[in-house]
């Protein structure tokens, strides 16, 4: 199987739960030099995951990076922006935005959770790795939980790739159900 068709055979990536079966074929931009005017969230996930496969460190740095932004952008209804206390003034909030926040803005947000469709998936690791238990972190543990070996707080590890959030996967299933009937 060639690299271009490989991504369409993957399972649908979802936050915390893998959907069984292949990713539905989407109008993924072809390798030829041409402009594609319409892409889906699955197209974006496919491209992000291909980029992770090609250069993990570059994609991690790009997607974890945040730049300051103004309040107008922070109030955008679908772009995800983080808020933090400004160093210049403890009373003033400042805002930062990253690539995934902008990409999520393309596909809207879940009205109940406020989350977008795209989520990064990381390994959760022990920062010390002191014991054998530190190296075997159960999948159910989250960042900040205590390591079962040394009791230190767990941190983000390697970027595994990108996936649909649970809310986005529910929307995909609902749409698929509607198109079947």
Image (cartoon, rainbow, N blue to C red):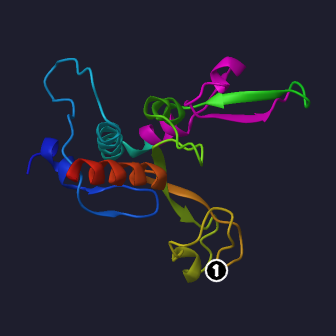
Q: Is residue 5 left or right of residue 42?
A: left
Q: Residue at x 22, y 17 (%)?
A: 35
Q: Which residues lie in the magenta part?
A: 58-87
- In x, y percent, where is residue 59? 43, 39
In the image, residue 73 lies in the stretch drawn in magenta: yes
Q: Please give left or right for residue 64 compared with residue 11 in the image.
A: right
Q: Position of residue 49 (x, y in %)?
A: 33, 45
Nearest the eye: 119 or 172: 172
In the rendered image, the residue lying farthest to the left is 1
Identity of the residue drawn at 22% across and 53% down: 181
In the image shown, does 92 or 17 lie closer to the viewer? 17
Residue 161 in view (yes/no): no
Q: Position of residue 138 (x, y in %)?
A: 52, 76
Hey, which quadrant is residue 92 in on the image? top right
> Helix or strand or loop: what does disc 1 sit on?
loop
Q: Is residue 173 above or below residue 72?
A: below
Residue to which mark 1 is pinned: 148
């Amino acid at each position: 199987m060639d690299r271009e068709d490989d991504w369409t055979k993957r399972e649908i990536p979802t936050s915390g739960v893998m959907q069984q079966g292949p990713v539905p074929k989407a109008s993924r931009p072809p390798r030829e030099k041409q402009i594609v005017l319409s892409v889906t969230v699955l197209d974006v996930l496919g491209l992000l995951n291909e980029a992770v496969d090609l250069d993990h460190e570059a994609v991690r740095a790009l997607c974890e990076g945040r730049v300051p932004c103004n309040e107008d952008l922070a109030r955008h209804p679908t772009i995800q922006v983080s808020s933090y206390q400004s160093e210049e003034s403890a009373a003033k909030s400042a805002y930062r935005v990253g690539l995934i926040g902008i990409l999520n803005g393309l596909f809207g947000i879940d009205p109940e959770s406020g989350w977008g469709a795209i989520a990064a998936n990381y390994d959760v690791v022990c920062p010390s790795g002191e014991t054998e238990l530190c190296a075997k972190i159960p999948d159910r543990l989250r960042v900040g939980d205590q390591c079962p070996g040394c009791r230190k707080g767990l941190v983000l590890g390697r970027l595994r790739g990108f996936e649909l959030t649970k809310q986005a996967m529910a929307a995909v299933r609902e749409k698929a159900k509607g198109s079947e009937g």
